Amino acid sequence: MRQDVKCEIICSQHGSFWQTILNHIYNRSGCPLCAGSKGEKLVSRVLHGLGVDHQPQWSHPTCRDRAPLLFDFYLSPLRALIEFDGIQHFEPVKWFDAVTDEQAEAQFLVTQRRDRIKNDWASINGYPLLRVCELKDVEAEVTDFVEALRQRGVEVKDPKDGEL
């Protein structure tokens, strides 16, 4: 069995998503929406309410550090990206007592490097990228971003039309 082969998996709550068999079975990875942070879940609800088809945990093979980097959301009809940035994107975080200050600092530097790679990749490849900070109004930020893209002339299908 090849490790990089993706298969379609259906979540009873969120519908279908694609994941490698290895991740789903052996690493016990599941639906990315079920596993997402509160902020990611809020972004998804806002996008759904706006009628924007979106794919969570999207990657492109050319956006990589040592491995492909995942964007929190790809908005397919808008060809745009959204990242929800928690506190760990702005300062070192010790998630539990076993983490040393040095480990937290090292992970923070890795997170910053990956954020720069994603920012540069999105800019070079023409993907508008919204970074939502957990300290901001998520609903307003996402709505303003989508409306700006719509005003740019990008069509978004109405979910009532059954197109999404």
Image (cartoon, rainbow, N blue to C red):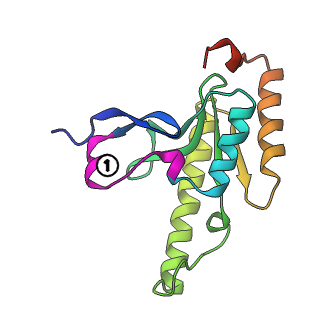
Q: In the image, is 51 to the left or to the right of 22? A: right
Q: Is residue 38 above or below residue 63?
A: below
In the picture of the structure, the residue carrying the numbered disc 1 is 23
Task: Give the class, few, some or many, for how many residues have Cα within 10 Å of label 1's Cα (few <14, many ≥20).
Answer: some
* Residue 35 vs residue 60, the one in the foreground: 35
Q: In the image, is 85 to the left or to the right of 144? A: left
* Residue 126 vs residue 140, the one in the foreground: 140
Q: In the image, is 13 to the left or to the right of 19? A: right
Q: In the image, is 131 to the left or to the right of 124? A: right
Outermost residue toward the left? 1
Quadrant of the image occupied by residue 146:
top right
Q: Is residue 58 above or below residue 136?
A: above
Query: x and y percent of residue 31 in the render?
Result: 45, 45
Q: Is residue 30 visible?
A: yes
Query: x and y percent of residue 89 in the render?
Result: 63, 63
Type of residue at label 1? Asn
Query: What is the quadrant of the N terminus in the image?
Result: top left
Is residue 29 rendered magenta in the image?
yes
Q: Residue at x 38, y 52 (%)?
A: 29
Q: Which residues are magenta?
A: 20-34
Quadrant of the image occupied by residue 90:
bottom right
Q: Residue at x 81, y 37 (%)?
A: 143
